[in-house]
Amino acid sequence: MFSKDRWDEILEALNANKFRTFLTAFGVFWGITILVLLLALTNGLKNGVTADFGDFATNSMFMWAQSTSKPYKGLPKGRRFNYKISDVAAIKSEIPNIKYVSPRNQLGGFRGANNVTRGTKTGAFEIYGDYPEYIKQQPMDILQGRFISYSDIEAKRKVCVIGTGVVKGMYDKDEEVLGTYIKVNGVNFLVVGTFKMSNSQGDGEQDASTIYMPFTTFGQAFNRGENVGWMAITAVDGVTITSLKQQVFDLMKSRHKIDPTDERAIGHFDLSEQFGRVNGLFTILSLVGYFVGALVLMSGIIGISNIMLIVVKERTKEIGVRRALGASPWTIKSQILQESLILTILSGMVGISFSALVIWVMNTILDNAGPVDNFANPSVSMQVVFTALIILIVSGVLAGLIPANSATKMKPVDALRIE
């Protein structure tokens, strides 16, 4: 490897027919480029789709009450019911491996009717009544002040935490926010904190246009009492919420006198299950990317092998002379392998560099153009780069193996005899 004469011979062999060398190298260059770009695009698609999940704890589900579809114990079909705050305590105490249960109530809607006023300013925002542990399920950055506390829950304090969109819509620039009041459906609330969502993807504008207040205060101010609109339930680490949700459903059905076989009475969205499906899909897409890229790369490797066979044939007499002068079969074989390996690695590294440039251009365009639905930050990890390098090394050896064996099988006398 460190012989100057050997390197001179390799460079001379590659320069002997530059156009042929270029076409041979281009096959490997194009194959590795396709491989890296396919994986980068798959990763970009994955980033965009998983951004829709936000930073919400993915081992969670949302559960709400619907109407019954079967009569049960004298109660009619089509009966509607409401969860109560006592149901939350029952889930926590009777079902193991539940980490958080957050009862929630909601008022208004994003871009709906105006429901918040402050002086002469009005706005339409999403209003949620929540418990303090909700911030552990939906991480957010508290920019000023604090989030809801249990002392707020117990004292039913009329306080709220507002998003950056609310601040922008209801306050002047550089105006102090903490300690001021906003009026929600005619009820005054003291602002004790401001926040922004940690996740920059997804519907950031809607997230920012949200107001959180204590669940108990919400119930008292807006006549919800002990009713719970819906719940966010998270399982402990190492246990999927999917494996626990049937226990939750059975408990709620028994507490609200619902037929155990009624599948419509309880609505739910299993975030863990959906997240698992998405991850499974993108694992398959990554494998497809490797497969397609490997096929394209294989065509380039076959091209190198064919060209090396031609090179060996062209240098038959040279090989004969070297064998006659005492060169061992391994010396001949190692030179052919080295030529093949150098050609493969150089063309492959150029392909990796080119694909990195294309990925950088794509990210620059996305940064300037703004978020794109279901696509964000196409990239590949260093693990992919190292994998590509290993593929190149193995491919280079394989491409030179047949020509090298062909060269060492020649007898010196036969090689010298060929004109």
Image: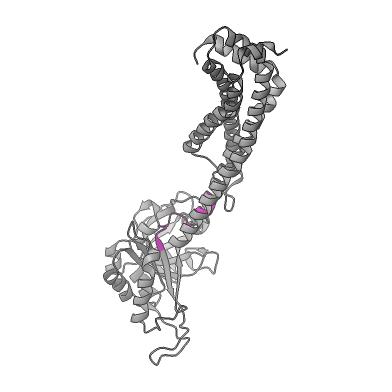
Residue 181, quarter of the rendered image:
bottom left
Which residue is more in the foreground, 323 or 152?
Answer: 323
The residue shown at (28%, 64%) is 150
Count of numbered tags = 0
Q: Could one spot residue 116 in this view of the protein?
A: yes
Residue 409: image quadrant is top right
Measuring 33% from the left and 63% from the top, which residue is drawn there?
100
Q: Position of residue 178 (x, y in %)?
A: 37, 55
Residue 92 sits in quarter = bottom left
| Residue sitting nearer the eye, 244 or 213 | 244
Residue at position x 63%, y 28% in the image: 305
For residue 57: magenta? yes
Camera sees residue 170: no
Horizontally, residue 144 falls left or right of residue 68, namely left
Q: Position of residue 259 (x, y in %)?
A: 40, 84
Q: Which residues are magenta?
A: 47-60
Q: Residue at (52%, 40%) from the top-left corner?
A: 380
Q: Quadrant of the C terminus?
A: top right
* Near-viewer residue (318 or 355): 318
In the drawing, does residue 349 fall left or right of residue 127? right
Q: How is the image coloured?
A: one colour
Would you say residue 409 sits in the magenta stretch? no
Residue 23, compared with residue 188, is above or below; it is: above
Taking the view exactly as shown, the residue that stands out farthest to the top is 325
Residue 72 image position (x, y, % from top left): 40, 88
311 relative to 256, above or below = above
